Amino acid sequence: MAKPISAVTRASTLRVLGLSCLTLVLSMSLGLLSTARAAVKTWGGATSGNWGTGSNWSGGSPVDGDDLVFPVPASRFTTTNNISGLNLRSITFAGSNYVHRGNSITLTNGITANNASRTNIIEFAIQLDAAQSFNCLNAAATLAINGVISGAGDLTKIGLGTLTFGGSADNTYTGDTIVNAGILQLAKSAGWAIQHGSLTIGDGMGGSHADIVRYTGASGSMILVGVAITVNGFRVAGFEWTQ
């Protein structure tokens, strides 16, 4: 004959079941929150130049997984990333004359510069967490990366404009470098612009002088010996490789 369950046993069982249900609800809620956090954040700069100030953005300060947009109108164009360990999906420039400084970021889906002309500058370090493209869309526009580029992803230059590797410290990313459109300008004052992987210039499309890698910096050691260089449509003028 089965023994009746005591009141103490029933209470303990209910407590355990209650805690299990609460844990499940909390886990689901936290999962939904972490999924919903990432968003598109558009810069305004109303309060200061700091990324960590929520009132400077539509949607609040950036969090991991966000896509950041820097528009044509803004109150401030010199900004400081004062957020540590920020892992971004992408950065898009609609406007020009931005200068970004501060803490390093990790990036997975590249940078797009849609500005019609002039320059945007990134001075903080960027770690590539995946193969990605840096797109400087228009021929009269320049995107200057003066911080160290690190990580393991390939970097593909697209768009008709100029992507500049500047600064004075080595880029350390280990992926390949591919120039499929426009100009990649190696303008470091010291250090290696490209020291790992291979360099491919030209995708066989766009015609003569469509894809260019150009030396303009003071450093005489822009590309490390041992980096295999492939030029699809070869011409050399000074220190310029051109499709």
Image: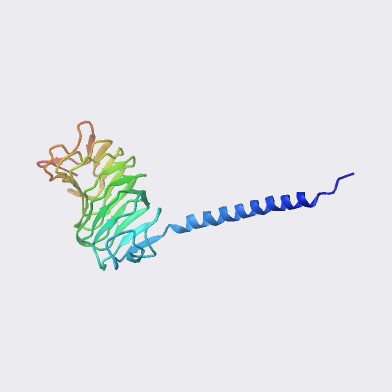
Image quadrant in which you'd find residue 39: bottom left
Which residue occupies the foreground of this view, 52 or 149?
52
Residue most extreme to the right: 1
Q: Quadrant of the N terminus?
A: top right
Which residue occupies the foreground of this view, 60 or 203?
60
Residue most extreme to the top: 226
Give the residue displayed 34% in from the left and 59% down from the top.
52
Q: Quadrant of the C terminus?
A: top left
Give the residue displayed 24% in from the left and 39% down from the top.
199
Give the residue displayed 14% in from the left and 43% down from the top.
189
In this rendering, the count of numbered labels is 0
List x then y, in percent, for residue 7. Answer: 79, 52
Which residue occupies the foreground of this view, 109 or 66?
66
Question: Relative to 50, does residue 222 appear above or below in the rendering?
Answer: above
Residue most extreme to the left: 238
Q: Is residue 91 left or right of residue 193?
A: right
Colour scheme: rainbow
Which residue occupies the foreground of this view, 210 or 2?
2
Image quadrant in which you'd find residue 114: bottom left
List x then y, in percent, for residue 157. Answer: 26, 48
List x then y, in percent, for residue 33. Answer: 50, 57
Give the residue displayed 19% in from the left and 32% down from the top.
225
Q: Is residue 2 left or right of residue 225?
A: right
